[in-house]
Amino acid sequence: MNIKPTAPYLNAYVQIHKQDKPIGPVVNNIPAPSYKIAKLLNKKLQSLTNLPNTYTTKNSQEVAQEMHNIQIDRNYKLITLDIKDLYVNLPIQSIMRTTRFWLNKGNHDKIITEQVLHILEIILKHNYFQYNHQYYQPSKGIAMGTSISSTLAEIYL
């Protein structure tokens, strides 16, 4: 019996804030073999890395409400960044090095650090998706839409 692995589904979203409105791929990673461990590792990484100046939001309405409550004086500046194709351009080896740096900075047990990095490496190697009955594995970057992608982007940046 030939059993193919369950692969994430590929969805698309239109980037309406972009002039040409390009379509970007978003992977529904829920059916992937690494989904549950990636979700668990995501929570663990967030607690272990303790990144400075992080802020997480659910949607733009929440951001607008929070910004409305901020007291701003003349010396404040608001800066927004839009990094072109951020997730697909994140270098895997650099993500691993940066994650190791933040884990070591937290003075965690070396065994925990090595286990986290080993699991992260496995998850990043299982970065594949199915489209039109074909399987694809990108040669670089991480998939947008996975449970751990935004945390890895924050760690790297």
Image (cartoon, helix red, strand yellow):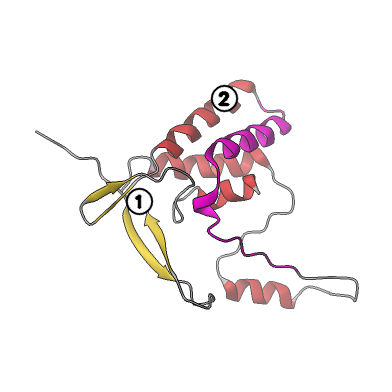
Secondary element under disc 2, as helix, strand or loop, is: helix
Q: With 56 as the anchor, is 144 left or right in this view?
A: left
Residue drawn at the location 62% of the way across and 33% of the way down: 97
Alpha carbon separation for disc pair 1 and 2 = 26 Å
Q: With 157 as the anchor, is 34 left or right in this view?
A: left
Look at the picture and state if 152 lies above or below 102.
Answer: below
Quadrant of residue 44 in the image? top right
Which amino acid, mark 2? Answer: Glu
Residue drawn at the location 62% of the way across and 59% of the way down: 56
* Label 2 crowd bin: few (<14), some (14–19), many (20+), radius 10 Å: few
Which amino acid, mark 1? Answer: Ile
Is 80 one of the magenta-colored residues? Answer: yes
* Label 1 crowd bin: few (<14), some (14–19), many (20+), radius 10 Å: some
Residues shaded magenta? 79-108
Q: With 103 as the anchor, is 124 left or right in this view?
A: left
Residue drawn at the location 60% of the way across and 38% of the way down: 94
Look at the picture and state if 147 lies above or below 67.
Answer: above
Kindly identify which numbered label has been placed on residue 1.
Answer: none
Q: Nearer the viewer, residue 125 or 62?
A: 125
**Which residue bears the numbered disc 1?**
30
Q: Position of residue 54 (x, y in %)?
A: 69, 54
Q: Position of residue 78 (x, y in %)?
A: 77, 70
Q: With 155 as the anchor, is 69 left or right in this view?
A: right
Q: Position of residue 127 (x, y in %)?
A: 40, 43
Q: Nearer the viewer, residue 100 or 56?
A: 100
Secondary element under disc 1, as helix, strand or loop, is: loop
**Which residue bears the numbered disc 2?**
114
Q: Nearer the viewer, residue 115 or 40?
A: 115
Callouts 1 and 2 close, C-beta under 8 Å: no
